Amino acid sequence: MLSKQNKSISFGVWFQYVYKPEKEWRAYFQKYKNAGIINYFIQGNPSQLKKLIIITKGMGINIHAWVWTLNRPKDEVAMNNLDWYSVNREGQNSYDFRPYVDYYQWLSPFSDGARKHIKKNIKEFSELDGLASVHLDYVRYCDVILPIALQPKYYLVQKDEMPQYDFGYHEEARRGYKEIYNVDPIKIENPQLDNNWFKFRLDALTSLVNQLVEIAHKNGTKLSAAVFPFPEMSRRMVRQDWSSWNLDIVCPMNYHHFYNEDLDWIKSSVEQGIKEIGTQVEYYSGLFVGSLPPVELKEAIKKSINGGATGVNFFSIKNLTEEHLKIIKSV
């Protein structure tokens, strides 16, 4: 860790659990801790994470449960409840029509069954003794607008919202909206200009997240989330109003190259996020290591800190070279 203006800056990484003997795990964590990395956001099941919490006890590091929240590929319970899936403006559910990539299989925040399923999952993780946080990912709608640098990969130019990528038209959403506004949202002529429909979808997700916060806090566990960059962008691209969420830690993915931006954009993104959430929430700036040579990584870390971040996360651990680790240790 380093200190700036009497604030400690913590470093973290995202990675997926794989089996290793206990001795190998200790050596693995020690290697990265030696570079100053203390937060580990790990995708695994509760029993796997419980094992890691026990193994790392006394090492001075934090284990976080990295959980895919609304995008749930290969979720066998959900696959037996197809009415839980999000629906686009063309009436297709996200299990039958998988936008952009096959693993995009989105549940709807309007589905009561989906919400109960997610809450049960988060509760199970939050009950792990010694867990630093339950870390939500894919806690959003499908990208209605992809980051500009990714659009060519899918042969797209998304100047406006396209109906096949515009999700949130679950039957419960349509029913609830019509009860309030006396109109079926699927009949709105230009939905991207309708602020009521826009906010209705934002609020459904916000209510779910804040209920998950309550579940985690009831078990004495913090809730964190990986989110899109600054709030205005996030709201428009993925209906994610994270500045309204009662999080303990927010981890915006400031992947500048996704947006064809330079490193200065990272500082601006951090500043815009902190302006909306204030300083009561820990802000960990997410950096995409695969696009950052060691010299640029050092600059990106400094941009994040100068923007006001209290931590920096690296995606992902497999992209961290020995040179990257030397840079992190030296910052």
Image (spheres, rainbow, N blue to C red):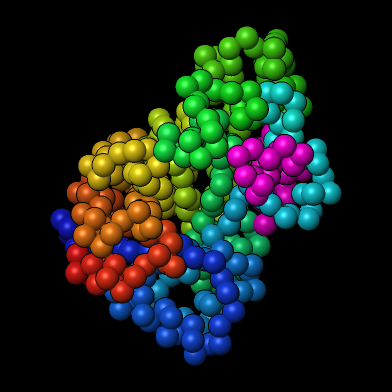
191 in the magenta segment? no
Determine the residue located farthest toward the left in the rendered image: 5
Q: Quadrant of the N terminus?
A: bottom left
Q: Is residue 91 left or right of residue 277?
A: right
Residue 6, how many percent across, how many down? 17, 59
Q: Nearer the viewer, residue 97 or 116?
A: 97
Q: Position of residue 202 (x, y in %)?
A: 55, 30
x then y, percent, for residue 284: 35, 53
Residue at point 44% right, 41% down? Answer: 228
Any magenta on residue 99?
A: yes
Instruction: Please provide percent x and percent y for residue 184.
Output: 71, 14
Residue at image point 49% right, 27% down: 157
Q: Nearer the viewer, residue 31 or 47?
A: 31
* Numbered disc total: 0
Q: Quadrant of the C terminus?
A: bottom left
Q: Magenta stretch?
A: 94-121
Q: Is residue 173 visible?
A: no
Is 207 placed above or below 190 here? Answer: below
Q: Residue at x 63, y 56 (%)?
A: 122
Residue appearing at x 58%, y 57% in the figure: 67
Majority secondary structure of magenta residues: loop
Left or right: 212 as drawn, with respect to 31: right
Visible residue check, residue 106: yes
Q: Residue furthest right?
A: 80
Query: Residue 39, relative to residue 179: is it above or below?
Result: below
Residue closest to the eye, 215 or 302: 302
Asked if 217 appears above or below 227 in the picture, the reply is: below
